[in-house]
Image (cartoon, helix red, strand yellow):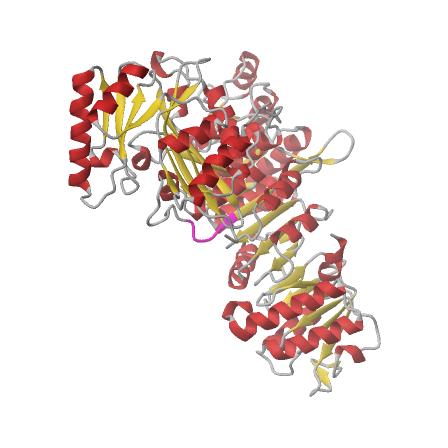
């Protein structure tokens, strides 16, 4: 990805469309580069001006006598196209088009953008934008503010990517207030060429970038994005990626043909992408900065190399000089997926020896309001050495005897000796400012409130779990792909796109699912004969393309134990179906062997453009859309992905032997999820599906499909 060096670290920049009029974008960008201290050479291009801001102007980029790395173009679309052609002729290696009026307005603007992209790709020139804020590299060896933001941020080790230019200006203001530094800062606008994935790959290889933060409106790559990000966030040289996604909503499809479709809004896709790629999702700009500070936290190891501080577990020690904030921190610690560490006897003995009798030596440790810095130092040194402690939070509230600076110096001394993360909360502004500044200068994360510190610690712990995840061996599966394809192709050829249980069960059997004996009956006599053949008790279900949710129509009867019950149920089901929808086409009534007892779960899938099949797992039955206790992942599903899905729902506690219940066969569920992933990847005609309920039995006894529905679509080109 060295092809982006010309954009981020140019030695010569031409501003095409540089203006002599203050307040115009072309003027302000040129002046921002000039006044920002750019270490390279800067050229304004304006055929109507002799100079811009006192710098000689050129009528065209081709007339500049020296080589140019980067051309900033601030021109309307029809002029921008000609400027791009000239820049390519000049040999420019990178382009940033700031101006708007391209794809975002459609029509001619879209056509011109496509032509520009084609020109750049043919010439091997990378393009950022159009319709973007620009790029910033505040590091002193470059000092490039090629944007229309007047603020040059401090240099730092965190890079920021945003699709929104307007948000960038707000973030820069926010960063200035927090004295937060950046390595690279970029607005990508329309993403005509360079997109998030290009930038993530580049920044992953950037020695000056330790953490990447990004604001996402829409990702344009699916499985490729997930595969690349797994390597970036969790490979040999992991780089944490924090993302805030705009338009967060749980709304699903308005008129979906499956439970999966109604639950799988666009946010389910992004939750799956982030979970499978190791991206930490944040909920606000404030959190983005809070987490970024914690993820950038490093210390020097015995070899003199900097190493990121991530906890190996979730056991946290809290040291505070005030009970109230300690309680708040405790509550937020638990809600952030952490737990209070239980101290070893030696730790408690050390604390007792250093602290006054009125202090609390259990977690959270209260060193009492009159604590001087030495009391903090002794308490923190004791707890951080405890093998049962994975990290610590230090809370300081300013009181008359508090030495914020001395306490900060003590924390830094201990932090340098420990590989465990220590996060701080110095509450207040004026009285603690010197200590806060000292902690910041020495790379120790410090927050104004305990809940911010706890959330940040929880995020770092989640990332630690990602780094330490197990890669499980793939399942050895054998599928009858041809048998499933025959059912699907026959249905599509017949114009039948909604498949009920007869066809659906046949497809699932081909991929390793256990199904029940099932027959279609068109009369009560046929239903009785089928029931006696397969053995009582049986379940009866209405079969109609128009009645998707059978229970809602009174179309399901369970536990029919003899001939009389089957006949009565058959008649009642037909009567209920006609009352529910008089125009419904009734194919018949399905007779199915009663399944052995099991807990109800749901498997589902909905296919999305770009992203592909989105798989769902959750608590099943008739209440699935009430409780919405589901997890999503994109296919292809790895074995460990399936495990995270099964363990990621609240209902996992019920599957894991809750209050004396037998443990369910979760291993079978994990394998079947991978089989489902294989099925929907092998057969792109499957648009949506629900397996609900899937009855999971006791450990070692597998799972049985009780109900299924498929929605097909004709292959592209048919």
What is the magenta range? 244-248
- Quick one: 673 or 425, which is closer to the camera? 673
Q: Quadrant of residue 573?
A: top left
x and y, in percent, of residue 399 in the image:
46, 38
Please, what is the dominant secondary structure of the magenta stretch? loop
Question: Could you tell me which residue is drawn at 72 percent across and 81 percent down?
Answer: 54
Above or below: residue 50 compared with residue 470: below
* Left or right: where 144 falls relative to 343: right
* Left or right: where 659 falls relative to 129: left
**Is 245 part of what is drawn in magenta?**
yes
* Left or right: where 254 falls relative to 401: left
Q: Quadrant of residue 539?
A: top left
Question: Could you tell me which residue is drawn at 58 percent across and 71 percent down?
Answer: 111
Let me know if residue 429 appears in the view. no
Q: Quadrant of residue 706?
A: top left
Let me know if residue 499 appears in the view. yes
x and y, in percent, of residue 318 in the image:
50, 28
- Quick one: 278 or 674, which is closer to the camera? 674
How many tags in the picture? 0
x and y, in percent, of residue 372 in the image:
54, 32
Above or below: residue 674 compared with residue 181: above
x and y, in percent, of residue 192 in the image:
61, 62
Question: Could you tell me which residue is drawn at 53 percent across and 42 percent down?
Answer: 273
* Left or right: where 145 falls relative to 692: right
**Is 1 part of what is drawn in magenta?**
no
């Amino acid at each position: 990805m060295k092809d982006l060096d010309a954009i981020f670290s140019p030695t010569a920049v031409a501003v095409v469309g540089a203006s002599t009029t203050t307040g115009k974008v072309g003027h302000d960008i040129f002046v921002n580069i000039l006044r920002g201290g750019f270490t390279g050479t800067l050229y304004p291009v304006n055929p109507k001006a002799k100079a811009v801001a006192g710098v000689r102007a050129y009528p065209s980029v081709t007339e500049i006598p020296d080589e140019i790395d980067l051309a900033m173009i601030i021109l309307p679309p029809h002029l921008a196209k000609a400027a791009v052609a000239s820049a390519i002729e000049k040999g420019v290696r990178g382009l940033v088009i700031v101006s708007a009026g391209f794809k975002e307005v459609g029509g001619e603007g879209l056509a011109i953008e496509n032509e520009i992209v084609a020109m750049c790709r043919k010439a091997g020139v990378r393009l950022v934008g159009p319709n973007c804020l620009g790029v910033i590299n505040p590091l002193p060896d470059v000092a490039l503010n090629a944007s229309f933001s007047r603020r040059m941020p401090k240099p730092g080790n965190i890079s920021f990517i945003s699709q929104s230019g307007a948000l960038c200006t707000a973030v820069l203001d926010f960063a200035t207030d927090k004295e937060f530094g950046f390595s690279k800062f970029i607005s990508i606008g329309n993403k005509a060429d360079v997109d998030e994935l290009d930038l993530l790959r580049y920044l992953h290889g950037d020695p000056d970038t330790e953490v990447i933060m990004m604001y996402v409106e829409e990702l344009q790559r699916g499985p490729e994005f997930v595969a690349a990000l797994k390597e970036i966030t969790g490979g040999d040289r992991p780089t944490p990626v924090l993302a805030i996604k705009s338009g967060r909503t749980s709304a699903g499809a308005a008129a979906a043909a499956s439970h999966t479709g109604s639950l799988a809004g666009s946010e389910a896709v992004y939750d799956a992408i982030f979970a499978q790629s190791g991206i930490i999702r944040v909920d606000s700009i404030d959190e983005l900065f809070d987490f970024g500070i914690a993820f950038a936290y490093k210390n020097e190891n015995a070899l003199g190399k900097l190493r990121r501080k991530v906890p190996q577990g979730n056991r946290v020690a809290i040291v505070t000089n005030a009970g109230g904030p300690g309680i708040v921190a405790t509550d937020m610690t638990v809600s952030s997926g952490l737990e209070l560490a239980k101290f070893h006897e030696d730790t408690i003995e050390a604390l007792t020896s250093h602290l006054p009798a009125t202090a609390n030596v259990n977690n959270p440790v209260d060193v009492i309001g009159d604590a001087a810095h030495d009391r903090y130092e002794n308490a923190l040194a004791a707890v951080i050495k405890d093998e049962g402690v994975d990290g610590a939070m230090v809370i300081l509230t300013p009181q008359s005897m508090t030495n914020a600076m001395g306490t900060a110096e003590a924390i830094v001394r201990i932090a340098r000796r420990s590989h465990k993360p220590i996060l701080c909360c110095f509450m207040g502004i004026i009285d603690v400012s010197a200590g806060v500044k000292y902690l910041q200068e020495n790379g120790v994360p410090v927050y104004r409130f305990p809940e911010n510190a706890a959330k940040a610690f929880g995020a770092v712990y989640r990332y630690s779990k990602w780094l330490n995840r197990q890669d499980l061996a793939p399942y050895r599966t054998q599928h009858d792909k041809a048998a499933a394809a025959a059912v699907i192709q026959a249905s599509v050829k017949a114009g039948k796109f909604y498949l009920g249980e007869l066809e659906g069960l046949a497809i699932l059997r081909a991929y390793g699912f256990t199904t029940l004996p099932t027959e279609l009956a068109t009369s009560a006599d046929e239903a009785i004969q089928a029931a006696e053949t397969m053995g009582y008790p049986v379940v009866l279900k209405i079969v109609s393309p128009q009645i998707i949710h059978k229970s809602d129509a009174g179309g399901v009867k369970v536990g029919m134990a003899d001939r009389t019950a089957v006949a009565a149920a058959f008649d009642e089901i037909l009567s209920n179906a006609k009352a529910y929808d008089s125009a419904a086409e009734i194919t018949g009534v399905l007779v199915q062997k009663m399944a052995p007892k099991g807990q109800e779960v749901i498997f589902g899938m909905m296919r999305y453009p770009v992203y592909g099949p989105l798989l769902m797992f959750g608590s099943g039955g008739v209440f699935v859309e009430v409780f919405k206790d589901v997890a999503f992942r994109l296919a292809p599903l790895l074995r460990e992905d399936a495990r995270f899905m099964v363990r990621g729902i609240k209902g996992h506690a019920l599957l894991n032997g809750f209050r004396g219940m037998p443990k369910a066969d979760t291993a079978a569920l994990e394998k079947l999820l991978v089989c489902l992933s294989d099925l929907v990847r092998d057969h792109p005609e499957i648009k949506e599906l629900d397996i609900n309920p899937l009855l999971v039995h006791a450990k070692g006894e597998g799972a049985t499909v009780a109900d299924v529905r498929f929605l097909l679509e004709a292959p592209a080109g048919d």
